[in-house]
Amino acid sequence: MTTLVRTTETLLPDPICAAAQDVACAAALADHGPEAVGVPLGLLAGEGLVVTHRFACTLPGYPGWEWYVSVTRVEYSRAVTIDEVTLAPGPDALVAPTWVPWSDRLHPGDLSPGAVVPTAPDDARLTPGWSGTDELASEIDPGPLHPVNWEPGLQRARVPSAYGRESAAARWYNGEHGPRSSFAKAAPGECASCGWLLTIGGPLGQMFGVCSNLLSPADGRVVSLDHGCGAHSEASPDGGARPARSATVVDDLAPDDLEMGHS
């Protein structure tokens, strides 16, 4: 039978060890029996005087797996000895998926009572909180959602970073309690004009609040100000839509500018 040799440009199999296919096969049969060892599949050249002979694995449940039998010899000797017999996956073997840490496999809603999910010390969503030594002035926090004078926290070891707040805002805004949900599209008004809206402080309060209507599907949830549902406090009895909220206007003019505009 012709032996398949897989080598690199600089690594060639030792000819004496390469010819010891019968010795390698006998070792595999002795360890695992004829019901587990199949036909030869070739060999692999190792460093020095080491050659690995490959044999098909015929065990149920191991399709595509191979027995690797490594043989070697002492220099200037023709006597071949067995290094080890191992089972390894071949190119088409059925193998388990790559292991993923439990904390990385979790999705929103997976956490059960009593479960603990540690947060990595270098999680980009968090930044050091107030400790007496933090240089809070060095926080670079551009944009309307995270002004420079954000509250550092009350002796918390870490607080949301600019990235963490922006990630949360994007997730909430694009979620089921944002303006694109089916409830919001069919609502008679926006949450910003609803009496059930509880405002929140901090930078995220410019875009979000908390619903307090027990009849609303968003009760107790963070909602965007342009979200809405049929439980709007000002919905008309006939179900007609209220006038839409006008766009927010930011007054950045000084009193002198206003007076000049009316003169």
Image (cartoon, helix red, strand yellow):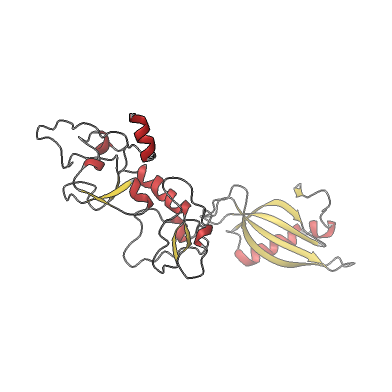
Left or right: where 130 falls relative to 227 = right
Q: Quadrant of residue 38?
A: bottom right
Left or right: where 148 falls relative to 109 = right
Can residue 235 be seen in this snapshot? yes
Q: Residue at x 15, y 39 (%)?
A: 234
Left or right: where 57 falls relative to 233 = right
Residue 44, image x, y percentages: 74, 54
Residue furthest right as drawn: 76
Q: Residue at x 38, y 40 (%)?
A: 254
Is residue 19 shown above or below 113?
Answer: above
Residue 87, image x, y percentages: 62, 60
Q: Residue 125 versus residue 255: which sits nearer the camera?
A: 255
Q: Residue 30 versus residue 216: which sits nearer the camera?
A: 216
Residue furthest front as drawn: 263
Residue 213, image x, y percentages: 18, 49
Residue 203, image x, y percentages: 38, 51
Left or right: where 109 falls relative to 93 = left
Is residue 165 shown above or below 261?
Answer: below
The quadrant of the rendering that contains the C terminus is: top left
Q: Quadrant of residue 243?
A: top left
Q: Residue at x 60, y 64 (%)?
A: 32
Q: Residue 89 versus residue 214: which sits nearer the camera?
A: 214
Can residue 251 be seen in this snapshot? no
Is residue 81 shown above or below 198?
Answer: below
Q: How many marks?
A: 0
